[in-house]
Image: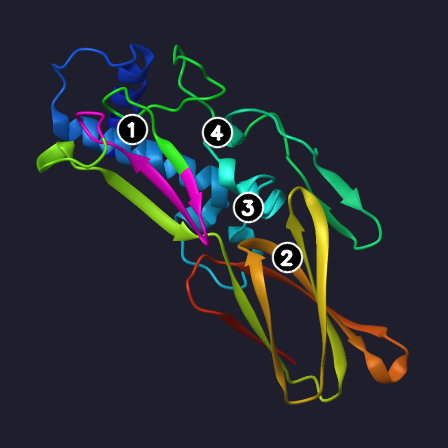
Amino acid sequence: MVLLMVVTLVGIAMIASFVGGRGVDDDIRYEVTRQRMLEVKRALLGRLADVGGGEDITLCGGFMSDYGKPEDPTNFSIAVLLSSQHPQWSYDDTQKFWAGYRGERYLDPSPGQPDPETKFLDGWGFEIDLMLSGDSIEIKSNGSDGKDGGNGGYKEDIVESFYWQRGITVNNRTGSDGEFRIVYPSKGLVMAASQILSDGSSGTFTNIPVGLMKIEVLDTSAASKLQSIKMLCLPPGKTNYSIRIK
């Protein structure tokens, strides 16, 4: 904890002076960079950035739980976390679920940093990039030389990546046929996907953003009467997430 505080304080001092002097050792700059990249991941995932999770909704948070799929995935960048976006946080009374951009920003730049609504700097004073490609998000520092690639040592790129959407396989173990509905945020709005599953069968929902969601079960034999509700915190992962509903 003490080391983390020292690294963070050193990082703030360096970022405040932008590139700053080169008197600070590269290993400290590297640790600052790692800490800054973790801040980006936390802005995206909340506590899921630190702890591998399952169904504990207290782990969920950040942009992905609130906003879901980005508005424009092809132009997704760190500026999305550094400035307010639309639509704003609001409640969908039909689906009984919240979605949207919550608050003014998810990521706070250090004091004195240039372009605080578009740039976030690493320990060497270069921009940290945030890119979305297919199902994965990549957080990247170009290292001590600020150039893509690198030929060893601290000049090498520093990359953190994770899957931002995945499939969910639902196993119906309720004892009756039912309609299984997943409610989740996407592009700042509340979305829903549903399947009819007979008792003992399974169904897979694809391209569901990681983070907070709700699974509703409606009993089809009783005119779609609500049978149960389960809140779920979907962690990052490549393979389908499997859950049994009893």
Residue 140 inside the magenta-drawn segment: yes
Amino acid type, label 3: Met
Question: Where does residue 120 sit, x and y in percent of width and height?
Answer: 39, 24
Q: For marks 1 and 3, give the CA distance.
A: 27 Å
Question: Where does residue 183 sit, x and y in percent of width and height?
Answer: 70, 59
Q: Residues within 10 Å of mark 2 (few under 14, many from 20)?
A: many
Q: Which mark is residue 64?
A: 3
Q: Earlier in the sequence, mark 2 or mark 3?
A: 3
Helix, strand or loop at label 2? It is strand
Q: Which mark is residue 213?
A: 2
Q: At 25% from the left edge and 28% from the top edge, which residue is drawn?
A: 7
The residue tagged 1 is 5
Residue 49 inside the magenta-drawn segment: no
Q: For marks 4 and 1, give the CA distance.
A: 19 Å
Q: Earlier in the sequence, mark 2 or mark 4?
A: 4
The residue tagged 4 is 107
Determine whether label 4 and label 1 are within 8 Å by CB. Answer: no
Q: For marks 2 and 4, give the CA distance.
A: 23 Å
